[in-house]
Structures are given as structure tokens and as C-alpha cells.
Amino acid sequence: LEGKIAPRPRPEVTQGITERCEIGCGKLYITINYDEHGICEVFTNTGRQGGCPSQSEATSRLVTTALRSGVDVKYIIKQLKGIRCPSTIRQQGKKATSCPDAIARAIEAVVKNRTMGNIPLSGKFIYDPQEEKYEAVAGKIRSCPECGASVEHEGGCVVCRECGYSKCG
């Protein structure tokens, strides 16, 4: 493929983590592997509880292809983070708003923890305290969980005029 970008081959040896994330339709297991060049692959498994296994697999395959093709991980996170799924919107207290959002948040945690030298062999990753904004009740949210701008409380809902986020969907 002359003049075309192609992903680098899969490394022989990688190391990584698998995280279980609660999503609207059950659990999503996200495996993120990395080598000396950075994150090189993402796998997902929805377990027995259902979910959208084909959509999650497609997302993880495209993320893997992008990562191995040299796309900056920040752009991948930006594209996936904040995507909302109806099954998650209906359930209060979920940290992830969809499978792609959960994948983005897990990748972001790996990037942050690798940068800080905190990749644990077991236990939880250190997440950004901003994540807790998703657990806030509508009347207490002060800034947008997607872009960080100030939000307005309107008609029993929370709306961000900056990026269009709405707590009510």
C-alpha cells in the first residue's frame, strides 16, 4: 500500500490490564495492552449479561488499528468520551455513559497512570477527580462532565451551552 498508512504489526509481547466497568446493560470488561511504544491494542468483552458485543468489538478493533497506525491517543479519547447510550442514560450513578465512553475512560486512565508511573499489578487505577461529576445529582452539577464549562439548570435538567451536553439526554 504505497503512500497509505498501515498499522504496525502486533508486538510479540505486551503487558496490560483488564478493567470491569458497569454500563447500562451490564458489565463491560476492557483489556488494554501496551508495549514500549505505548498502548497498542484494546479488547472488550461484555460477559454474560448482554450489551452490544458487536459494537464494542468494532470500537475496540478500530481503536487498535488507529493506535497501531500512529493516531495520537488523545484524539481517540476525545472522539469516544461522552458518547451516550439510552440504556445508561436511564440509570443514575453510572460512571460511563456508553461502551465507547467506558473504553475512552479506561484508555485515559492507562495513559495517566503510565505517565505517572502508577501502573498497578492489581487494584484500581487512579482516575481524575472530575469523574465524580457523573455521580452528582442534577441540582449539584456545576460544570459540564464533557467539556468542563459552566452548566445551566433549566426545566429540571442540566444543560451545557458550550458543547451541548444535557443531563436529560
Image (cartoon, rainbow, N blue to C red):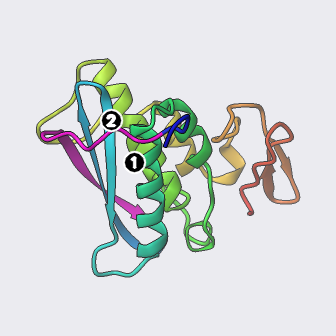
Q: Position of residue 127 (x, y in %)?
A: 39, 35
Residue labelled with disc 2:
39
- Residue drawn at (14%, 41%), measured in percent from left and top? 12
Q: Position of residue 2 (x, y in %)?
A: 51, 37
Position of 142 relative to 65 (above/below): above
Earlier residue among tags 2 and 1: 2
Q: Residue furthest front?
A: 2
Using residue 159 as the reference point, say whether residue 48 is left or right of it: left
The span shown in magenta is 6-24
Q: Amino acid at mark 2?
A: Ile
If the image is split into quadrants, where does the C terminus sit?
bottom right
- Residue drawn at (69%, 53%), measured in percent from left and top? 138
Question: Mark on residue 64?
Answer: 1
- Foreground of the two, 126 or 58: 58
Q: Amino acid at mark 1?
A: Thr
CA–CA distance between discs 2 and 1? Answer: 8 Å
Question: Mark on residue 8?
Answer: none
Q: Position of residue 95 (x, y in %)?
A: 48, 53
- Foreground of the two, 151 or 169: 169
> 10 Å neighbourhood of mark 2: few (<14), some, or many (≥20)?
many
Q: Secondary structure at mark 1?
A: helix
- Residue drawn at (86%, 41%), measured in percent from left and top? 161
Q: Secondary structure at mark 2?
A: strand
